[in-house]
Amino acid sequence: MLAPLVSIVLAATPPPEFDPNTVTPGPEGFVAIALVAVGAVLLAMDMARRVRRNTYRAEIQERLQAEMAAQKTAEAGIADKD
């Protein structure tokens, strides 16, 4: 079923005007890929920093809530004794 379609596509495709074995991206391609790699590394570092910051903030919030709960419990204990 696909064989006729493939043969039509291959027949309609013109032969390449260059030697596919000698085509390389050159220095421009290297620079482009290097920039993408540097950008990806910088984004990963920024994401790790933001995740770490949010984790610390959550830990601090939990500590503050625990301290406030302990303080309220202590105040309630003092009020019950009076």
Image (cartoon, helix red, strand yellow):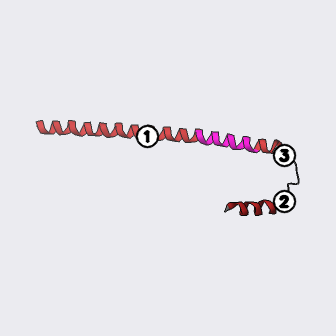
User: What is the C-alpha distance between the residues marked 2 and 1?
Assistant: 61 Å
61 lies left or right of 73: right
Tell me residue 65's x, y (percent): 32, 40
Side of 71 where 29 appears, left or right: right
Q: Which residue is mark 1?
A: 57
From the viewer's perspective, is residue 60 above or below residue 19?
above
Q: Residue at x 21, y 36 (%)?
A: 74
Residue sitting at 16 percent across and 36 percent down? 78
Q: Which mark is residue 14?
A: 2
Q: Position of residue 77 (x, y in %)?
A: 16, 36
SS label for mark 2? loop
- Relative horizontal placement of residue 18, taking residue 55 as reference (left or right): right
The picture places residue 36, in percent across and down from the top left corner, at 69, 44
The three-letter code of the residue at mark 1 reads Arg
Which residue appears at 77% of the width and 42% of the height?
Answer: 31
Pointers 2 and 3 in contact (CB under 8 A)? no
Q: Nearer the viewer, residue 2 or 49?
A: 2
Horizontal side of residue 58 vs 40, given as left or right = left
Bin the neighbour count of mark 2 within 10 Å (Cα to Cα): few under 14, some 14-19, many 20 and up: few
Q: Which residue is mark 3?
A: 23
Q: Give the quadrant of the N terminus.
A: bottom right
Nearer-the-camera pick, 53 or 33? 33
Q: Residues within 10 Å of mark 1 (few under 14, many from 20)?
A: few
- Count of numbered badges drawn on the protein: 3
Judging depth in this view, the residue of 81 and 60 nearest the camera is: 60
